[in-house]
Image (cartoon, rainbow, N blue to C red):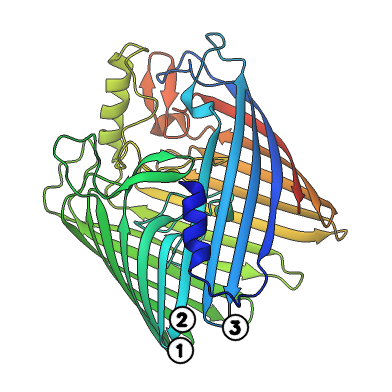
Amino acid sequence: MRRLLVLCLLGVAPAAVAQPAVNGYVDSRLWAAHVRTGGLLPTADVPAWANLTELNMQLKLRWGDRGLALIDDSFFYQRAWAFPDGFHDVPAYRPLSVISEAYASYNVTDHLNLTAGKKRIVWGPGQALNPTDLLNPPKDPTDPTQQRAGSWLARVEVPYERFTVSLVGAARAFGIYGGVPSTLIVDPEAPDRSAHYAAAARVYALVADADLGLYYVFTNRYNDAFENKSRLGASFSRLVGKTVEVHGEALVQRGSVRPFKNLGNAMVTKMLLGPRYTFSDDSTLGLEYYFNGDGYTADEFETGVRLLSLMPSAAAPTSMPTATMDGRDQGVPQKFSFDPIRRHYLFVSALKPRIHDDFTVQATVILNLQDLTGQFAPLVSWSVREWVSLTLAAFAPLPGLASQQVAVAEHHYGEFSLTPLGWRVLAGVRLFY
């Protein structure tokens, strides 16, 4: 299937095509973590040590000035050990292959572009999260650019100088082998044979030096349990002066599929906004506030925690119930997976590049504003040569306020203190070719 996919993408090019560009990297990451046993969530499948090695290949092929084909493919070898209950096979740490993108695009005219295949399309300007993005695998707020995986789709785009109209149809993938789905839209193992798809439309406009976007998204069991659901979104981004960029995006829907919520047909809003300041040396400092309209209130969160405390360890879920569906394409493995379940969050990100020309330092803070639990994620990278870089990163939990958390026995639980993972340290090396 993979070879057939490559041939199909390359076969759209005429014989007189320019030479292809091939690059990629080999990346190896070693994790060491403190596993917090004795909590409410099971730890049997949580290792204290893990290694993930990725072999990535990116092939880009252009023909003329109108056509482009691209494949971004990775094979991951994973190994984990030092489980609390002894070594055993855990599916999450088996080798896997991920096709992040594999698409062909053609400019029929200067004002008509056609794209088909697997591609990541993110329209919202948010850095840590994109509430308007209902199509793609989720990204890591501590390293947003790491998630390159997109969705299987077809897009028609009509670009002009000051506005663009885009239409997208996306299909959920099932039976993925080697990164290639065996079927799209319909799950062959589901008894109801229902369709899983999304349709989206965007109008972008440049108005008074501001980037504005309006979105309409219709989904049917695509990445969540909503059936025949319409949602509306909007976004903006503008440079204020020469150093401050302000942006925001919002999504509006009716109802929620989140457990413990009984909103009926009430209006629900998800919104992110904030500024980003760029210093003269290209260092950046960003702040973003995220309001999750169907997130758990304090009482609802306490209900979930109490239910977890009554479950035997073997029957307990691996996390608090969320609004996303099991089996959602997670894309490439993330350093930090985040699915917000409360209502108010603050993201702080800082980046300082080119320290002594070779070093980059960055740090991210994710803070739940209701219980003040969170994550602090510092990272240092060193570009030893143009073709090799070294990384040292850490993930440290923020304990929060005990008075705002749920007390069970002698422990207090907030959103981020529920996880069985305490601190983590990562050392990585990446070789480019």
Q: How far apart, in angstroms, are the residues tagged by discs 1 and 2? A: 7 Å
Numbered tag placed on residue 107 in the rendering: 2
Residue that protrudes farthest toward the front in the picture:
15
What amino acid is found at the position of numbered circle 2 in the picture? Asn
Q: Residue at x 70, y 49 (%)?
A: 25
Out of 148 and 397, give the one closest to the viewer.
Answer: 148
Q: Residue at x 39, y 45 (%)?
A: 181
In the rendered view of the protein, which quadrant contains the C terminus? bottom right
Q: Position of residue 287 (x, y in %)?
A: 54, 60
Out of 176 and 402, give the one closest to the viewer.
Answer: 176
The answer to whether residue 392 is seen in the rendering is: yes
* Residue 27 to residue 146: above or below: above
Q: Residue at x 27, y 58 (%)?
A: 198
Which residue, given by chain and number where applicable, does mark 3 sit on?
241
* Residue 401 to residue 366: above or below: above
How many tags in the picture? 3
The answer to whether residue 274 is seen in the rendering is: no
What amino acid is found at the position of numbered circle 3 in the picture? Gly
Q: Secondary structure at mark 1?
A: loop
Mark closer to the chain start, 1 or 3: 1
Numbered tag placed on residue 110 in the rendering: 1
Please report contact status of discs 1 and 2: CB closer than 8 Å, yes or no. Answer: yes
Neighbours of disc 1 within 10 Å: few (<14), some (14-19), many (20+): few
Q: Secondary structure at mark 2?
A: strand
Q: Is residue 219 left or right of residue 420?
A: left
Neighbours of disc 3 within 10 Å: few (<14), some (14-19), many (20+): few
What amino acid is found at the position of numbered circle 1 in the picture? Asp
Q: Is residue 373 left or right of residue 352?
A: left
